[in-house]
Image (cartoon, grey):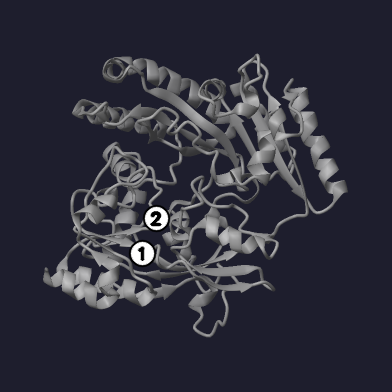
């Protein structure tokens, strides 16, 4: 047993550290099966102080540390770049520390999942607003903050989950512990405000993809869940891609307070019906795009008024309303009432056995997404030769497109786009060429979206480095990121290799 292992074992006990080969390989991947990095060991601290001690030892030994929450990142964000380092799993830090019902703020350990937190809050008639990432049942609060995550539900009204952040307790890469927001005042008894006492240092750790610190405790605003809600689903007319964008733009331009809106492209609808994913739509004669909205209100009068305004927008665009029940096609009811929030974002993944996502999800302006999706069709045609090679091995060609296009705060949408492909292990054999093609196509697609001006909130392994390699960052912006990294993490211990640091 190495001296490093013995030092770390004294911090967390033998039950929460492992260098077992099977454990290490279990932590070598995230959602993506195209990226792998096997750590030297895995450790699961249970407190801020334990995280601090682990990082101090990592600096002494010059070994990288990779923080991991739920492990749901699609870009290889919570596994090592290469076979090295310590994966620091925060899932043992999953307690709810305090619910301040008077000030509507909850404080939790960063390893707790969005699903567990919202299950707890529902007993008090509360929720977190944005319910976290699309994979929120298992995604950690700390990971959501690290990614500016959206997709779990409520994003049209509340935006990314970082919008509701009040304060953080963060362990810096060298082991120092800081608090942000109101808690930067040493005399503050409770977290109550993110802004003040100087610069918004919490923002440094929002969307940092695990680069600048390990989140240990998080305080979030919570919100009373309104008593009234309505949800409707519509079948789109022809040219549904363009018309869906017009509908979403008009909702924003008229200032209607909407909880969620999602558009399913024609391809998603037809493939989903073909493979039995959408039984409520099997009766459709026209397999066109489908769109839904959800609204909340504090009174029936308010609800009726919002419903009238939205219905006018949808019906004026020749959209056809489904019945009110799930069995009649109203997927919006399932999404809101049946916990569909976290089950809908990536609905084509796993549709075919062995078919895995090669993800490129991003945020773009509402009025930009029809052009971008048309260009992804063109990108697909340009790479037919590579895709044909996968077809010849597997009998099925990769599928390019987007899952639901999700309305988020301001005039933005989240494109859950990318392509689905097979992994290299197919039909009992290893086909290395499939991995090579997938990575080549992945980088090409990401670069295409970068040049459309898309904003990526998850960056992880592949995209953080690609952005630098292709000159996607404004030079001065990247140099400032590097300067901050060098000051607070002089040995580049934390998430070594991301952004080419």
Label 1 crowd (10 A; few <14 / some 14-19 / many >=20): many
Q: Is residue 261 left or right of residue 51?
A: right
Residue 415 horizontal side relative to residue 20, left or right? right
C-beta proximity under 8 Å, tags 1 and 2: yes
**Furthest-left residue in this view:** 2
Say which of 35 and 244 sits in front: 35
Disc 1: which residue: 213
> At x 12% / y 72%, what residue is drawn?
3
Q: Can see residue 244?
A: no
| Disc 1/disc 2 C-alpha distance (Å) | 8 Å
Which label was assigned to residue 260?
none
Which quarter of the figure has residue 245? top right
Q: Is residue 163 above or below residue 488?
A: above
- Indicate the position of residue 311 as horizontal and vertical percent values: 78, 32
Q: Earlier in the sequence, mark 1 or mark 2?
A: 2
Q: Residues within 10 Å of mark 2 (few under 14, many from 20)?
A: many
- Split into 4 quadrants, where in the image is the N terminus? bottom left
In the image, residue 349 lies at what x, y percent? 44, 33
Residue 180 is at least partly visible in this image: yes
Residue extending farthest to the bottom is 187
| Percent of width and height locating residue 443 | 31, 32
């Amino acid at each position: 047993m190495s001296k490093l292992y013995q030092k770390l074992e004294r911090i967390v006990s033998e039950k929460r550290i492992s260098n077992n080969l099977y454990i290490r390989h279990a932590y070598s991947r995230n959602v993506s099966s195209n990226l792998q990095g096997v750590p030297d060991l895995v450790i699961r601290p249970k407190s801020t102080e334990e995280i601090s001690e682990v990082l101090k030892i990592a600096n002494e030994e010059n070994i990288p540390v990779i923080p991991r929450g739920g492990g749901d990142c699609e870009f290889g964000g919570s596994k090592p770049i290469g076979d090295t380092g310590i994966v620091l799993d925060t899932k043992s830090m999953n307690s709810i520390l305090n619910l301040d019902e008077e000030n509507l703020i909850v404080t939790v350990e960063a390893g707790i999942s969005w699903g567990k937190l919202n299950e707890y809050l529902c007993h008090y008639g509360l929720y977190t607003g944005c319910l976290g990432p699309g994979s929120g049942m298992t995604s950690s609060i700390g990971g959501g903050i690290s990614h500016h995550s959206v997709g779990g539900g409520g994003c049209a009204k509340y935006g990314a989950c970082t919008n509701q952040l009040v304060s953080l307790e963060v362990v810096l890469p060298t082991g120092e512990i800081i608090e942000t927001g109101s808690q930067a005042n040493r005399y503050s008894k409770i977290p109550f405000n993110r802004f003040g006492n100087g610069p918004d240092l919490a923002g440094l750790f929002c969307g940092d993809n695990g680069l600048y610190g390990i989140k240990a405790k998080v305080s979030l605003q919570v919100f009373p869940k309104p008593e009234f809600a309505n949800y409707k689903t519509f079948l789109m007319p022809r040219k549904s891609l363009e018309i869906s964008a017009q509908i979403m733009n008009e909702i924003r331009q008229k200032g209607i307070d909407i909880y969620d809106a999602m558009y399913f492209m024609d391809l998603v609808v037809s493939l989903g019906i073909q493979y039995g994913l959408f039984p409520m739509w099997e009766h459709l004669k026209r397999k066109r795009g489908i769109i839904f909205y959800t609204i909340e209100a504090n009174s029936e009068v308010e609800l009726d008024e919002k419903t009238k305004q939205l219905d006018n927008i949808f019906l004026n665009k020749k959209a056809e309303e489904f019945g009110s029940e799930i069995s009649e096609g109203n997927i919006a009811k399932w999404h809101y009432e049946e916990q569909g929030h976290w089950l809908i974002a990536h609905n084509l993944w796993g549709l075919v056995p062995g078919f895995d996502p090669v993800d490129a999800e991003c945020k773009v302006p509402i009025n930009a997404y029809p052009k971008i999706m048309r260009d992804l069709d063109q990108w697909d045609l340009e790479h037919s030769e590579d895709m044909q090679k996968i077809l010849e091995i597997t009998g099925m060609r990769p599928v390019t497109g987007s899952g639901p296009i999700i309305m988020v705060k301001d005039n933005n949408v989240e494109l859950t786009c990318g392509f689905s492909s097979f992994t290299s292990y197919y039909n009992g054999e290893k086909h290395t060429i499939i991995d090579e093609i997938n990575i080549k196509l992945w980088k090409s697609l990401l670069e295409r979206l970068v040049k459309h001006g898309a904003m990526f909130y998850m960056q992880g392994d592949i995209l953080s480095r690609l952005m630098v390699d292709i000159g996607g960052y404004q030079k001065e912006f990247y140099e400032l990121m590097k300067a901050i990294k060098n000051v607070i993490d002089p040995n580049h211990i934390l998430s070594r290799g991301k952004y080419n640091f």
